[in-house]
Image: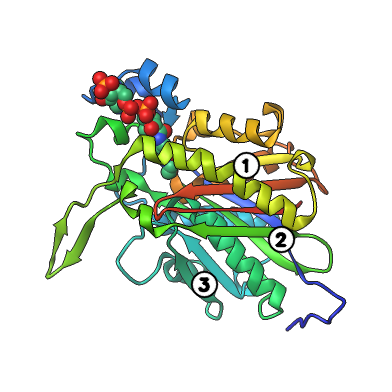
Amino acid sequence: MMRPSSSQRIYARLIGSGSFLPGNPVSNDDLVARGIETSHEWIFGRTGIRYRHFAAAEETSSRMAKIAADRALAMAGFEAAELDLIIVATSTPDYVFPSVACLLQGALGNKKAAAFDVQAVCSGFIHALAIAEKFIASGSHRRALVVGAEVFSRILDWQDRATCVLFGDGAGAVVLEAAETPGVLATALHADGSQAGILSVPGQVREGRIWGDPFLRMEGQSVFKNAVRVLAAVAEECCQAAGISCQAVDWLIPHQANIRIIDATSKKMGLPPEKVVVTVERHGNTSAASVPLALDEAIRDGRIQKGQRVLIEGVGGGFTWGAALFEF
Ligand code: UT7
């Protein structure tokens, strides 16, 4: 165990990433062909989405998480058995319990790490990463796997065109390791439970059946306005905590829900579009998987370079939001 002395900070350093998208891309026109009363023009014009991916029946959050995790571990260069912490962010777990994190741990063949899920919907990955960073910074844990994995296609009401065209499935993962050099520089997490009703799946499993409504329901305009308001503010808060200006960030990786929210946030932060990683066009909104999917893509295609500062942020049901700033 690595204990911090008063002069030495332990950083959580990102040393691997991986991701997975199931099946073939499904276009907006494919949705029209499936009988949804919509159009490519409406979906693309309002959201920037062209494609999304949907998991097959046997592809669960834990199975997709395993593929993303294997890829992240391969980049990090160590075995799953060496992990001492596994956190999965998901709102679409395989079962009520056990957690996706425990199922993933079993599939990875790790028998000692702490493993649990985090439920903060679309900002879940930011919450999971912030928790892992605190574990590592405290000296209690050294090697963490942090995953966002979702099958939102399972909770979509295909009769509700205002929501079913927005979401997709996928998984992304990162490996964090204790280090003396940065590392995660700052994190900020928030929630406002008074807004719980604007984005929810209000069904319950009880007495052997589902009570209430098992589908995703969203007041789109309320979510949109709240998202724009909180994302720029939490970015500012996170940068301030790290002692840098938002303009000093090399890459912004926001939650991928809507290109109009992404553009409004980066504009408020004073960041040009070239510094923003955007995947919403090809992935749709994959909830907790959206940020690690985009992050992995930008690491693997060489956009994110060693030493650069990356700000990731998310917003979602709860209402929850957060940001994390790290040096790659
Ligand atoms: O991951 C969590 C974060 N989630 C988000 O960030 C989502 C935030 N919200 C949004 O991105 C936007 O609110 C939406 C994209 C969901 C909706 O855009 P909007 O500009 O707020 O549209 P609206 O809900 O006000 O609907 C406008 C019109 C309505 O028709 P009328 O009443 O004006 O005749 C809807 O019935 O668009 C209609 N409409 C559609 N038309 C074609 C709604 N969905 C569709 C559709 N295709 N799929």
Classify residue 20 as left or right of residue 325: left
- Tag on residue 253? 1
Which circle's residue, 3 or 2, is located before the other in the chain? Answer: 2
Mark 1–mark 2 contact, CB under 8 Å? Answer: no
Q: Secondary structure at mark 2?
A: loop
Give the Cα separation between the discs numbered 1 and 3: 31 Å
Evaluate if marks 1 and 3 touch, with contact meaning CB atoms under 8 Å apart. Answer: no
Mark seen at residue 49: none
Ligand 1 position by quadrant: top left
Q: How busy is the neighbourhood of tag 1: few (under 14 within 10 Å), some, or many (20 plus)?
A: many
Residue farthest right in this picture: 7
Indicate yes or no: mark 3 CB to ligand 1 under 8 Å. no
Front tag of 1 and 2: 1
Q: Which comes sooner in the sequence, label 1 or label 3? A: 3
Which residue lies at the image location 71% right of the left edge and 33% below the top edge? 270
Q: Amino acid at mark 1?
A: Ile
Left or right for 17, reference 22: right
**In the rendered structure, which disc, 1 or 2, sits on the residue that comes first in sequence?**
2
Look at the picture and state if 28 lies above or below 294.
Answer: above
Q: Nearer the viewer, residue 164 or 260?
A: 260
Q: Position of residue 175 (x, y in %)?
A: 65, 60
Marks 1/2: CA distance?
25 Å
On the rendered structure, is 259 left or right of 269? left
| Location of mark 3 (residue) | 109
- Confirm or deny contact between disc 3 and disc 2 (CB under 8 A): no
Mark pair 3, 2: CA separation: 16 Å
Percent x, y for residue 206?
Answer: 16, 68
Residue positioned 52% across, 72% down in the render: 109
- Report the residue marked by disc 2: 77
Indicate the position of residue 81 as horizontal and vertical percent values: 60, 73
> Which kind of residue does numbered mark 3 sit on?
Gly
